Image (tube, rainbow, N blue to C red):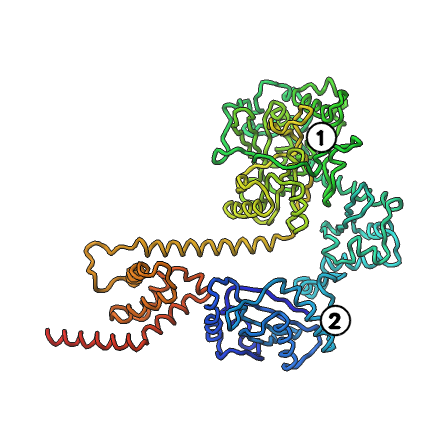
């Protein structure tokens, strides 16, 4: 038996869904109404006890396995066990049974607000439902379902089931589960497991830690599709395999696992290297020849960019005139310390499940770590590499590799590259494709060697958000809480930048700014850098800020620490919260606009103090006077008082009074979410039928008749 629950903001839509004609049967309710509208009104009346609670609706479905049958009485008993188990002891509720699918299921709709005005806690409804369902399965003799947190094999989704029924082809998840299950049979080592899968076309992508001592993760690729072991189920992760007898031992299995790691690294590297051709656009700073090699065109030291335009003539300020880089700060951390044994910093850095680019440095003959790589890159930029490094063509260019991997992880078609003059602060910008950036790495190295910082950001609308000035502990928190970054760069020892991929689809700049500010607040990033236009640093180049100089007097390289390119696990939750925040902000802005309209309202020149105004203007005039008497009024009572005055005046019809409340009442969307029109109409009707108003209307009609006779 499976139960799913969620909270929401509107009762009317939920009731209409649960009571669909011909598809549902009302089993039980403690409401008096018999129609969706009447029930929603009753829910709304209790909701007034907590007008500021945005999500008062609890909606759940409980489904039996295919072929299992329960009576209506049994379903009602199960529904009450769910409601009681979650704390709905003194609440309005509706229980319906739906007949629109092959498996039996019911829907529960409840008000989180009790009759006494308390609120049922919505903390971890899903997890709290699990033990209730297991007890129901046991007591009613139903098919047992493993808790979702413990499921060894992930069940197919509704979409996967429908696809399989429609095409006769299992989903990719089901295919991988079947192949992995077969490979696991009578298998006692990871090497055998990998070899069996590789033999049937499944590529295994392992993640290792501690120089191969620990196998921490597995992914599977079939027909170009990659799925994590956790997406298939607990049994397909290293820990799950170990429970089934498929163990990992470094001495025995590392050679096989390492071949898979190297193959994946080569695949990622090869995917970013195509036929590198010279840029045909002088305006974009094209250069000839393979990126990262020494050429005559690279040898100039006159400070020009490849287009022949001087930096002074080409320099542009960044958006808003702000510095393109945040003020770095933070303690030593991820990769920030030199290991005692003198190994490369990147090799010694802890792994978060993504490969790392090795640090762009080597120990120099003078004993200063990093001077060898620094000299190599400066020589390359100044055109002297051919003399000092004859075999340079065969040397791995780690700057180009880092650039390729960072841009591939971005997953965008164009990027803005910023070259900022460290002395004057001016920013020269280039709009390039990732391939064009790679083609111009040699020129960017030269500009970097002359004291310019190199920055990058995705161009246009995209789904990436930058968090600047993070500590290693903050990055660990990002991973631990499901905000796994797509890219992490170390801009100086212990100081990190993280790009979070919130969505593959584009997100407009204003919404990305909201997200950036929220992430910076939650994870301790630089709030001054939290906007949609901020640049991050491009890996493979040096950080030219004087404050970031190393003890040896050299500038630190910007190191690429992670480049998974994956959408973060919490993306759906974050986007839902973003939508809720934007809706609430729009509501607040509308409230402020309406309240300001009341406070600023003035009777047009020449209007009499009596007579008929437009309905909304009459509302505002009345509200202005009442608000002067009651500075912080109950707006529901104020709506009632204005409606009775308008109804008693004889100048306005019932629809006009309803319209005035809808258009003029402040905070209406917050106080009456989901049923504004119903509330306004009920208020106007109640005022219209008030005995005192009826008497006033009779008196008004008598006065009108007397005036007519006197004429």
> Which is more toward the observer, 23 or 455?
455
> Which is more toward the observer, 30 or 567?
30
Tell me the residue at 39%/54% (across/down): 592
Can you tell which mark lies on residue 313? none
Q: Secondary structure at mark 1?
A: loop
Give the quadrant of the C terminus. bottom left
Q: Which residue is denoted by mark 1 in the rendering?
A: 360
Compared to 699, does 375 lie above or below? above
Compared to 434, does 39 lie above or below? below
> Which is more toward the observer, 243 or 625?
625
Can you tell which mark lies on residue 144? 2
Of the two numbered discs 1 and 2 on the same chain, state the one appearing first in sequence.
Answer: 2
In the image: residue 467, left or right of residue 219: left
Query: Residue 474's x, y, as percent?
Result: 64, 44
Q: Is residue 671 visible?
A: yes
Q: Secondary structure at mark 2?
A: loop
In the image: residue 109, left or right of residue 682: right
Query: Residue 127's x, y, as percent?
Result: 66, 64
């Amino acid at each position: 038996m499976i139960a799913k629950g969620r909270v929401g903001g509107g009762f009317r839509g939920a009731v209409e869904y649960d009571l669909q004609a011909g598809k549902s049967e009302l089993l039980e309710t403690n409401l008096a109404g018999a129609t969706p509208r009447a029930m929603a009104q009753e829910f709304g009346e209790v909701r007034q006890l907590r007008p500021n609670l945005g999500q008062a609706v609890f909606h759940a479905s409980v489904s039996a396995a295919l072929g299992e049958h329960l009576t209506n009485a049994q379903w009602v008993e199960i529904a009450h066990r769910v409601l009681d188990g979650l704390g709905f002891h003194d609440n309005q509720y509706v229980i319906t049974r739906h007949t629109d699918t092959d498996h039996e299921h019911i829907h529960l709709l409840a008000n989180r607000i009790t009759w006494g005005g308390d609120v049922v806690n919505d903390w971890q409804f899903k997890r709290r439902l699990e033990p209730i369902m297991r007890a129901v399965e046991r007591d009613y003799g139903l098919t047992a379902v493993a808790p979702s947190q413990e499921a060894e094999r992930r069940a197919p989704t509704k979409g996967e089931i429908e696809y399989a029924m429609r095409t006769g082809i299992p989903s990719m998840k089901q295919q991988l589960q079947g192949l992995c299950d077969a490979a696991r049979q009578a298998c006692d080592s990871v090497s055998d497991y990998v070899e069996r899968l590789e033999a049937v076309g499944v590529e295994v992508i392992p993640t290792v830690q501690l120089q191969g001592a620990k196998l921490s993760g597995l992914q599977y690729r079939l027909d170009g599709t990659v799925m994590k072991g956790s997406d298939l189920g607990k049994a397909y992760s290293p820990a799950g395999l170990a429970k089934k007898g498929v163990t990992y031992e470094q001495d025995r299995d590392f050679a096989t696992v390492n071949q898979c790691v190297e193959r994946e690294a080569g695949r990622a590297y090869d995917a970013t290297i195509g036929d590198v051709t010279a840029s045909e656009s002088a305006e974009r700073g094209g250069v000839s020849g393979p990126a990262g090699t020494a050429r005559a065109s690279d040898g100039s030291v006159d400070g020009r960019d490849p287009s022949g335009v001087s930096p002074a003539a080409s320099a542009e300020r960044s958006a808003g005139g702000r510095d393109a880089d945040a003020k770095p700060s933070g303690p030593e951390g991820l990769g920030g310390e030199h290991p005692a044994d003198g190994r490369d910093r990147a090799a010694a850095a802890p792994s978060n499940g993504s490969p790392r680019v090795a640090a762009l440095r080597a120990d120099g003959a003078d004993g200063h770590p990093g001077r060898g790589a620094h000299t190599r890159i400066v020589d390359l930029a100044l055109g002297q590499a051919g003399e000092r490094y004859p075999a340079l063509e065969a040397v791995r260019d780690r700057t180009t590799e880092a650039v390729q991997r960072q841009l591939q992880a971005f997953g965008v078609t164009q990027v803005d590259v910023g070259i900022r003059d460290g002395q004057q602060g001016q920013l020269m910008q280039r709009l390039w494709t990732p391939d064009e950036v790679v083609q111009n790495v040699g020129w960017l190295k030269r500009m970097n060697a002359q004291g310019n910082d190199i920055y990058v950001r995705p161009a246009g609308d995209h789904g990436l958000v930058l968090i600047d000035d993070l500590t290693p502990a903050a990055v660990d928190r990002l991973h631990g809480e499901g905000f796994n970054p797509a890219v992490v760069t170390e801009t100086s020892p212990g100081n990190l930048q993280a790009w979070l991929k919130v969505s593959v689809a584009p997100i407009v700049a204003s919404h990305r700014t909201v997200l950036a500010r929220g992430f910076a607040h939650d994870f301790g990033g630089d709030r001054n850098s939290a906007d949609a236009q901020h640049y991050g640093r491009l890996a493979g180049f040096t950080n030219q800020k004087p404050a970031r100089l190393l003890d040896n007097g050299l500038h630190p390289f910007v190191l690429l620490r992670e480049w998974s390119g994956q959408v973060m696990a919490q993306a759906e939750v974050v986007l839902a919260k973003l939508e809720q925040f934007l809706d609430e902000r729009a509501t607040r802005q509308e409230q402020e606009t309406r309240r300001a309209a009341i406070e600023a309202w003035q009777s047009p020149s020449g209007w009499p103090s009596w007579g008929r105004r437009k309905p909304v203007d009459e509302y505002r005039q009345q509200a202005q006077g009442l608000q002067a008497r009651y500075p912080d009024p109950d707006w529901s009572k104020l709506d009632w008082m204005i409606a009775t005055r308008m109804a008693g005046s004889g100048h306005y019809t019932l629809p006009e009074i309803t319209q005035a409340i809808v258009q003029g009442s402040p905070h209406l969307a917050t106080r009456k979410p989901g049923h504004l029109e119903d509330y306004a109409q009920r208020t106007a009707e109640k005022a219209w039928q008030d005995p005192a108003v009826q008497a006033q209307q009779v008196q008004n009609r008598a006065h009108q008749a007397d005036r007519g006779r006197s004429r």
